[in-house]
Amino acid sequence: MSVTITNSGAIVLDKVVCDGYLPGHKIRVVTHVHSDHLLGLEDSIRDGDLICTTSATKDLLEVMEGLYPPQIVTPNYKTSFSYENDTITLLPAEHILGSAQVLVETQNGQRYVYSSDFRYEETQATKCDILVLDATYGHPSCIRPPLSETKATLVNLVRSELEKQNSIIIFGFYGKLQEVMRLIHEAKIDMPFINPPKVYSVSKIYEKYNIPLGDFYSSSSVMGKKILKSQKYAGFYHPLFKPKVYKNSTFIHLTGWQFEAPYKKIGLGEYVFSWSGHSDFNQLISYVKNCRPKLVITDNSRPGSARKLAEEITARLGIEAKPEPS
């Protein structure tokens, strides 16, 4: 078959490889900058003719990974180009800045789509013959409350804790952090944001693409150090980062694995919020239904529930589905 997923996580769509390295394939698409989708990228740069991604992902690759592929091309969303009789189109995906779905149309008229990671709220489904699908939250138990409820609850909590003169410490992955910065800024909550240097570099790329995040400062800057000693700021950190906290703080963890309610209190001044850049189970089923594929391949090379999702797609929609690698 000309569409498959390798044990190393490479998504093969005819002559095009996405998010992994496969010897002998000369064109690779990078759908976004999260590490599990950059597997073998240096090998692809060394051996390949073409690295294709969005301009925002290119900029994020430079600041996050220090990679500058000389053969990179950055087509606009929905602008097609050809490579060895395949037509390739990057389509918007709501996940992190620059994220893309990939559509490959073959010479004989077959349409192959790779969803990559996406949240099915502002991501558009595309009709195809074969769909390669993210399965991170592919189990039927993975159903979240509406994100709108989570956003409203988080804004109310931030306002309340700010009135108590508590600083707010938020942990999440790149992309989620910037979404919450934008949310708080647009809610007109008057407080500066602190980013450690790498998060700050990512936030500056968002700013470059005209996404308003509010007033944010690097924790290593003179102003940042001054703000950290105050009681009125929100800090945004990767989950593995251990920030120095000077005074009373409220801790918020952003996770896709909180399902029962918008948030859960896990300790004194500590909360887990339901926030993910991935679709939950119901969204995945809706997306597949609207793509109308003849075959779905669920991504079993990355953590998730690929086998169960494939079973549910067949049972609920009557569409042939299987996990790969098997």
Image (cartoon, rainbow, N blue to C red):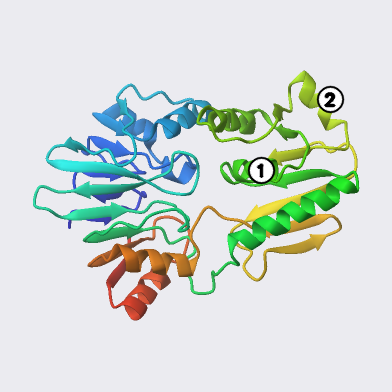
Q: Which residue is mark 2?
A: 226
| Observer-nearest of 273 and 136 | 273
Residue at the image point whose x is 78% and y is 50% from the top: 158
Ranked by sequence position, the earlier of labels 2 and 1 is 1
Task: Please name which of the two marks, 2 or 1, marks the residue nearer to the observer.
Answer: 1
Amino acid on which the number 2 mark rests in the picture: Lys
Q: With 49 as the anchor, is 161 left or right in this view? A: right
Residue for point 44% across, 26% down: 67
Q: Quadrant of residue 222?
A: top right
Q: Is residue 20 above or below residue 221?
A: below
Residue 52 percent location from the top left of the image: 31, 34
| Residue 1 visible somewhere in the drawing | yes
Residue, disc 1 = 186
Q: Residue furthest left?
A: 108
In what element is the residue under mark 1?
A: helix
Element marked by disc 2:
helix
Q: Residues within 10 Å of mark 1 (few under 14, many from 20)?
A: few
The one nearer the camera, 36 or 32, is 32
Quadrant of residue 189 in the image? top right
Examine the rendering and report whether any part of residue 242 can be seen: no
Give the Cα separation between the discs numbered 2 and 1.
24 Å
Residue shown at the point (60%, 45%) measured from the top left? 179
